[in-house]
Amino acid sequence: MENTNGSLSERTPLLSTSPSRNTQSAQSHNKRSWPIYSLLAGFLVILVCSVYSVRNKLPRPLSDAQARASNGFAGIHSYNEYLYKFQAPHPATTRENAAMQSWLIELAKDFQAQGAKKNLSIEIVTDDPTRLVAKRDRFASNEYWMVESRNVMLRIIGQTNKTDEALLINAHYDSVGTSPGVTDNGMGVAVALELVRYLIDHPPKHTVMFLFNNFEEGGLIGAQLYMNHPWWQGTGAGGRALLFRSDNLGIIQTLGSNAHLVHASVLGDSLLKSRVIRSDTDYTLFVKDGVPGMDLAFYTPRAFYHTQRDDLVHTTPSALQHMGQMALATVQGLDRMDAIPTGQQNTVYYDILGRILVVCSFTTFQIINMVALVTVPILAIAWTLTKSANGLHCKEKIRLLGERSLKVFQGFIAVILALLCILVTTGLAAVIMTWIHPSFSYGNAYEAGIFLVVAAFFGLLLSQILGDKLVTRKSTWDSIARFDAQYYGLVIAWWILVAVSTYYASHEEAGLYYAVYFLGSSTVAAFLYVLLPDTDHLRLSVVFVVQTLIPFVLMTELGLLTMDGLRHTSADGVPELTIYYYMAIPIVFLVLHFLPWVRVAGQHRKAASTTGVLLGFFFIMCVFLSVFNAGSPNRILFNQYYNVTEPTVNVSLVTETGLQDLLEQSLPSNEADTIHCEPAGDQTRCTYATDLVPLYARHPGKEVNVRTQTACHATQCRTNITAIVQNSVLCQLRLDHQIQRAWVNGELIDGDIEALMLYSRTFGKPMHWGIEYGRGSFSSLKPSFSCIYDEWTHGELPAFTTLRNSLPETALVSIRGGVGLATVHYGPVNLTLY
């Protein structure tokens, strides 16, 4: 049955039991090339669509009656009674924020009263006296902050009556100045409130604390304040719908064993550590303080993040139900334990289609990898010696092993060539697209993914053509190009990937968690090919499905997660090539996995020509697609600076691309004439001048009253500064040179000080600064006074609202840092010596 030309077909055995197993001719299998290519393409499309459909399924929100019947999360009640409150921006610097605090206080008191009726002890803190003094460098270098707390706390005493061991459920209630904050973080607050309500009806065994913290958007300040509160001493953990990151195996296992439709990925932690995602949550602070927990977060659509579209219109009760049932399931599971899990342990976790949550420690993960690394070569050698070499003498067995090893090495050469070609074509596609059509992936991530897939397949086909050119001896290439040789080589490639994964796991990095699935699936498929009878017409189909199904599902999920999670991070300054890099990783591995099947299909020149035409078509189509659209609007970072001695306001805007043209189309001519743009890293910064002065800064004498008093001794002077500001609770005293000692509302600060920020929780309340400096600096020291304003919904910041209303639906105004839409400089502070 062996052909005279020695060519191989899809009928070639993967683990041959006889050296004389025969094959069909190249001409025979070439006739079947296009059906095979069509089946490969169809398999890709159908499976991608299936994975996309399944992974995006959200649960149906439960009514109160349904939740009681199923002991579940009452998503409809949480949405109607709690989430509705988040309809206006409420950053920490606004009256809306104070109103939000008052609402939470009233709810806490009501919960306390409900608990008393059921003999359930509930403690609340509604007037937190905690203060934070810390160096933050938010608006200036060497800047120290003093912040008064607006945190609201509630503690349900468990049946154990212990307060030194508790579960902490944390959610910040402030938003940024440009957003109502429905997903960031109204949903976290609504879920936490519904959990309080649930626990009143289902008294917990363990004590549960709820922290509704303020000023998270200003730099995790609320959580830092809580860590200075007595309740924090020796207690709990928690966070605020993707399981984004966690450092406790028991907590994640509890989630996986109790929740449905769980979505989790260790990738989130890796992206935050590498600063690809340039944001953070309170979870970071709790972990640094040695308390384990988990972090739940929404990651798409990030284009609405911190914008006016983070509102009720752009979310659903189903999304709230998803987060709520994950949180409730975790709380229920932890409360059933005799003791709440303690201690920190980095963990490997990921979900499969939202139905299975895989969780293990890094030790277990490494053991699994090591078992695979040892088992696969042992099985291959044992199979060869017991089946293929049965009855042979020792020398003949050694010779046979050598021949098989050479075949594996030859196949590995083909894999390396294919990988290099795929990397080159995919990399060139990304670079060219970034150069020709910058920011394309921002609004067209799925289209960009398809473009990279076609480029990768083009590279795979080129590798087969290049093999014919590079290997001068036809017999050598025929050996390398054999289907079984390339399959063996692919198994070796996955074996090496598992080895790399094991190395990274030793450094507690789990980014290659999927490697063992590639190796395991390929190995099992190889044995199935041999074990299934030759007469079984479904043998190839079974082998193909077993080899590709699980890796394909994992890589498709990872690819979609990467596209959804990273597509809009370029607005935060992430280079677009970095986004393409993460998008390409699952694509490269998936396409490489098809190497032996492309070899079977044959007719590589025709297939490469067709794929090249398709690649060109997609490129032209992509070039003509708009970067921004209603679903992926251009997110423009806004802030304005106004000196009360000047006639105009300076507005500064930062975004990724197209900013100058957008401003010229949106601004009136007198403002457009002042536009100045310059590079800002990988982004563009534009400024312009406007006469739309902030409302509260139009009458500085009425807005601000600053008094000073200075006393000097032999070598030192101390100046006390008191300011009363009617419409700002965040103000700065800035110094023109460093001092070493200061006081803010009585709190002592020592260090290299150039600026002092004070956050008061009450409007119109006196703010106090004290600065100490050398007597010789009295005449030269020139402090200046500024305040931050973020209220705009009633016309307080006309420059902001005018620009916001002038932009098309494909552009939204946002802010970086949570607060600081407008900074008003009220001028120097006069030092008066008494």
Image: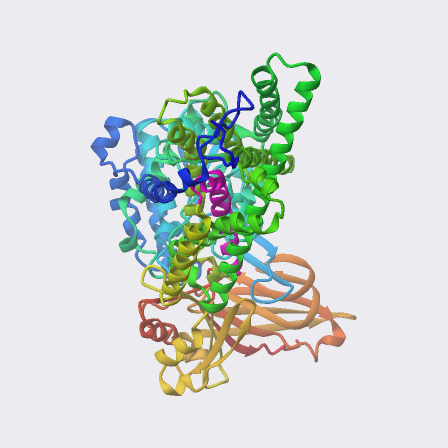
Does residue 181 appear in the picture of this structure? Answer: yes
Residue drawn at (39%, 87%), measured in percent from left and top?
670
Residue drawn at (37%, 32%), measured in percent from left and top?
355
Q: Residue furthest right?
A: 714
Q: Position of residue 781 (x, y in %)?
A: 68, 76
Is 595 inside the magenta-drawn segment? yes
Q: Position of residue 66 (x, y in %)?
A: 22, 31
- Which part of the image, by quadrant, shows the C terminus? bottom right
Residue drawn at (39%, 75%), measured in percent from left and top?
662
Q: Is residue 410 left or right of residue 203?
A: right
Q: Nearer the viewer, residue 119 or 642?
A: 642
Q: Position of residue 819 (x, y in %)?
A: 46, 62
Q: Nearer the viewer, residue 43 or 650?
A: 43
Q: Is residue 587 left or right of residue 79?
A: right
Q: Residue furthest front?
A: 4
**Predominant secondary structure in magenta?**
helix
Magenta span: 574-602
Does residue 817 appear in the picture of this structure? Answer: no
Q: Nearer the viewer, residue 573 or 319?
A: 573
Q: Residue furthest left?
A: 65
Q: Is residue 39 above or below residue 788?
A: above
Q: Position of residue 42 (x, y in %)?
A: 33, 43
Is 453 inside the magenta-drawn segment? no
Q: Is residue 16 left or right of residue 703?
A: right
Q: Is residue 806 above or below residue 154?
A: below
